[in-house]
Image (tube, rainbow, N blue to C red):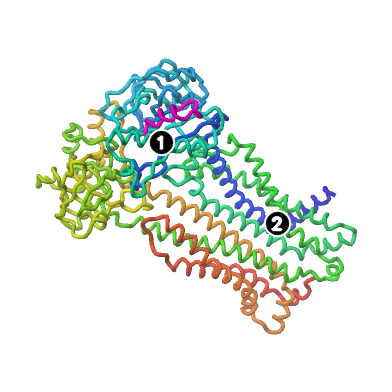
Amino acid sequence: MFKLNLKIALRNLFKNKVYAAINIGGLALGLTAFVLLLLFVNHETNYDKWSPELNRVYQLREHHDFFTPDNQQHWMTSTESRIGALVSDKVPQFKHVTKLGISWGEGYSVKLENADPILIKDIRDADSSFFKVFPYQFVQGDRLTAISKPNTIVLKKSTALKLFGTEQILGKQLKLLMWRTDEGRTVTVTGVVEDPSTPQSANFNAILHTGEREQDPDQIGSSNYCEIYASALQELDTTAVNKVLQKVYVDYKKASFAQRDIKFDDFYKNGKTPGLKMVPLQEVYAKPDLAQNWLDKIKPIIALSIFLLLVSIINFVNLATAQSVQRAKEVGVKKVLGAYKTQLVIQFLMESAIQTLASLFICVILVEVLLPAFNNHYEINLSFWHSKQLIAILFQMFGLFVCITFLAGFYPAWVLSKYNPVKVLKGNYESGIKGMALRNGLVIVQFIIAVTFIIGIGVMQQQTSYVANKDLGFNRDKLINISTNYDEGDPFVEEVKRIPGVKYVATTTQVMGNTFNSPREITFKNQKYDINNVTVTMDALPALGVRVMSGRIFSPEFMQDTINSVVINEAAANLLGKNMVGKTFTSGKQNYIFQVVGVIKDYNNEGFDKAVLPTIYKVTHLGGSSNTNNLLIRFDSDNYKSAMVAIANAWKKHFPDFPMKYISVEDAFQNAMQSTRKQMQIIVLFSIISVGLSLLGLFALSTFMAKRRTKEIAIRKILGASNFQLVNMLNRSFLVLVITANLISWPIAFIVTQKWLESFAYRIDMPIWPFVIATLSSIAIAIFTVSLQARKAAVNNPVDALKYE
């Protein structure tokens, strides 16, 4: 029986090659998107699963506002270093506690003997307990003693091969420089570890042990922030231990404030709260402190992939049920000969399984072809056949195969198998109103998805265009940013200023691509405000090309500017009050007096999902300063290649052991736009596929509808109906479906796109034209598609048509 059903299934597929190709191709496209999503989800959910011992490792997070982008409190992975010793002494559940330094800027300059220096990111300074907490497999060296002494370093195998070309490097020495003027530190390689088989949240290329992480700041008012991890003998009850951590932390804070003459209640006011908690290591990546978690990032992609798969399945069901007329006699004869309904269901499910299997085969080929582009798009490294999770992926694909076979095949199998053999053999093949209602409903669902996609493209394109052309409040052309500190009187800076083509050399913490915010409390009209504070050089605001709204910006002509003059942005002016030029405020413990000399237009220095913070700019270091890692250089012409060559040569002359790293502010802006553009590209691609599949389904369905109504068309034509009237008649039923789909898709698209727009601090109002264009284009496409088949049926000879069956 199996062999017979297989033969019949294959015969039917080859007999209806066009529709089988539409089915298999459509399913393959839907499955490809879904399998790519599966690979991505498997990658993201496999963080920190390279060792079973990691189930007992936890990250400590502190609730604070130190260097947070919005100056508000968050549960931060950067934790005050004293917490390490505190929990080690006060929380017996932890066996080992380690402190890990935060990744340093663009990385360390690594200098090997007789080799040019190279920048290596994620060389992280840790205390001697790091490898007691993290069970890395050592290729060279000993896990327990590798970083027991200062000035030692353990490299990942990939880093060792990059630097030395071999992993046999124990005892080798290298020189590390943290910044351009750093004299450097010579360290000895004491170990090489295997690269983990899965991604890791506490990522590094090398673990450095300087010995500085063993010490905490001597002065109680000083702080040093790092990441802190702890391991336990067994998996802990997170809720219970977090209560202990909170009590220990509050007691510690009260004791430290007592030593600094600060009242606990005075510090934690206006919504501020103390907090310390632990997070299981395997949840760290899924719950980042400031960034959006990976699941939220790909929710649109998940929805798109599911919708695309749904459109493919709808196509399958529509085509299979539409072909029921052709299979009716077969079903009738088999039933008369004694076939049971279950046997018929199995037969048709087998046909569905064969098509799904063919689709999966094509899908695997497409995945292999598309993976390089997908990896480049999302900046990850996924593989199908070489994936560490290949077995799990194959099981998932088998589950997908079974699921789609039943989803796509069960209803058609059920419809075909329930034909009444007496009626069928008399020539009555109609499947009834229910069958038509289902197919119409599925067509509506297809077009709801397609129209929603088209509207989404329109709204996203308009928002992207708005952001790309938005007035940023500064001039990003002819402006570069070198990743380095700015020092007054620096020989390199002075030489750069003399290079022809260089107009300004300056620094500020607020540069697109490298911004950090530092709040300070000011008192204005007896009211206190926390406002972002930025120390700049005299030429910083002219270098940025900011727009002056009132007053003036800093100038060497005014000696007062280097003492206590400040410039504020519009956001600060709106917060403090109108007409701020000439007004004064106080700041700092000594109540230094500052005078506002100008107000500038808000300028965007971060992504467009964040509003510009109220900010005070000052040249003086009075009341504290903001250290930067930005050296802004503005050129006086668009052609500044020769000037850049001169700057690079000057850098190499002054800092031969540290590579120069720079980016144009225009490129930094494009990088800020990148995630939005990538999302747009994915939606455009999925929309094209979805619309294409919907049209294929409509094309096939209209073909079958035309065939089913062959006699009706012939009789109408004999009675005098014109070709145009016949085409209109066939179009009318499909137009009703498409218009219905549009009416349903409008509120859905509005809610989805409005939600997306809300993620931008600067956004357009919801436009109407994408909705109108989506409706008109979907109607036009449907009319064109159906008319092709309708005209073919209408121009046939009615004599031949009346001989039909």
State which mark lies toward you, 2 or 1.
1
Query: Label for residue 249?
Result: 1
Residue 606 on image: x %, y %: 34, 48
- Amino acid type, callout 1: Tyr
- The answer to whether 497 appears left or right of 24 in the picture is left
Residue furthest top in the image:
171
Determine the residue located farthest toward the right in the rendered image.
337
Which residues lie in the magenta part?
Answer: 80-97
> Which residue is denoted by mark 2 in the rendering?
17
Q: Label 2 neighbourhood size at 10 Å, few (<14), some (14-19), many (20+)? A: few
Which x, y percent locates residue 154?
43, 22
Q: Earlier in the sequence, mark 2 or mark 1?
A: 2
Quadrant of the drawing holding the C terminus: bottom right
Residue 77 visible in image: yes
**Is residue 503 at all visible to an observer of this figure?**
no
Q: Where in the figure is residue 673, as x and y percent of width and height?
A: 38, 50
- Residue shown at 52% from the left, 60% from the top: 453
Q: Residues within 10 Å of mark 1 (few under 14, many from 20)?
A: many
Tag 2 and tag 1, C-beta contact below 8 Å: no
Q: Is residue 639 magenta?
A: no
Q: CA distance from mark 2 to mark 1?
A: 71 Å
Residue 148 in the image: x percent, y percent? 42, 18
Q: In the image, is 627 to the left or to the right of 396?
A: left
